[in-house]
Every structure is written in structure tokens, then in C-alpha cells.
Amino acid sequence: MLARNFLSAKELGLPPKHYDALIKTLHAMERGELKHVPVRVSMVVRSRARFSGLFSMRWWKHSTYCGTVACIGGTAELLGGVRFNQRSMRNAKPLWRLFYPVGDGWDATVEQAAEALSCYLTAGRAPDNW
């Protein structure tokens, strides 16, 4: 497999720890460590979030009876031990768009989300159909 040419943390306008967390998330997606799940509001419980490999773009980071369900950003926070704050994300429009898609991204599978994250890391933007 050829090495990928990701943009640098500086080129993406990200702190290095956030950049590393996004790469960890992509690798976890590619290794099949995340499972897409439909989550109903009734499943959400209040408890401490921790990585359990459950994925849905509809939830940032929510604990359920079956484990914590998280989107790209929430998974990156859990895997990287970082926090993305909304002000910095709004200043980095491509990252905001990756985390909050405008189209079909809300129903993305893990594979589709991995493609979107890879696009962001290599081109600095979310895909057009996201």
C-alpha cells in the first residue's frame, strides 16, 4: 500500500494533538474498529462517554446502554483525548463541514465517513457530496 500524503496539521490549521486524533480515527475506521448503529433518542442515557466503537454521524458523543455512540469528531475526541471547541471549528470551515454535513452525511456509514475524513486530511475539505 502506498503511503498517503496528508496535509500537515499546520496546513489544516489544527493543533497537532487534534490532527493526530483525526488520523487515529481514520485508522480505526479502516481497521474495522467502528460499527455503524442507528440510535434512537430513547437509547441515550447519562453516563461518562468512553470509546466503544459505535458510530453514527447523528450523535457527537452519547452514552447508551450498549456503549458510547460517536461521530467523526466525537470518536476523535475519545481516541485522542482532545476536545474540539465550536469556535475553532467554525473558524476552520472545512472541519466544521466534516463534522456537521449538509447533505447525506448524517446517515453515513463508517466507510463513507472514512472517505470524507480521508478527503479532509488529504485535500483540506469535506467531499462535495457530504
Image (spheres, rainbow, N blue to C red):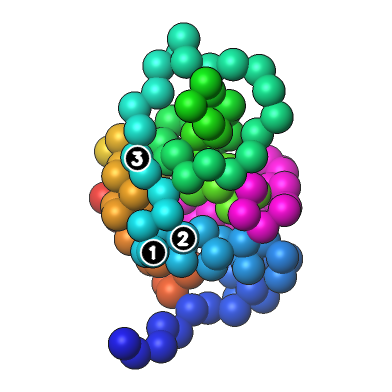
Dot 2 falls on a residue whose secondary structure is helix
| Residue corresponding to mark 3 | 36
In space, the residues marked 3 and 2 are separated at their CA atoms by: 13 Å
Residue 125 picture quarter: bottom left
Is the residue marked by circle 3 packed among few (<14), some (14-19), or many (20+) residues within 10 Å? some
Dot 3 falls on a residue whose secondary structure is strand
Which one is earlier in the sequence, the residue at label 1 or at label 3?
1
For image coordinates 64% across by 39% down, the residue present is: 50
Residue 6, x across and y down, in percent:
48, 79
| Residue corresponding to mark 2 | 28
Q: Amino acid at mark 3?
A: His
Task: Tell me which secondary structure the magenta stretch mostly adopts.
Answer: helix
Label of residue 55 in the image? none
Q: Amino acid at mark 1?
A: Arg
Report the span colored magenta.
Answer: 78-98
Q: Is residue 90 visible?
A: no
| Residue corresponding to mark 1 | 31
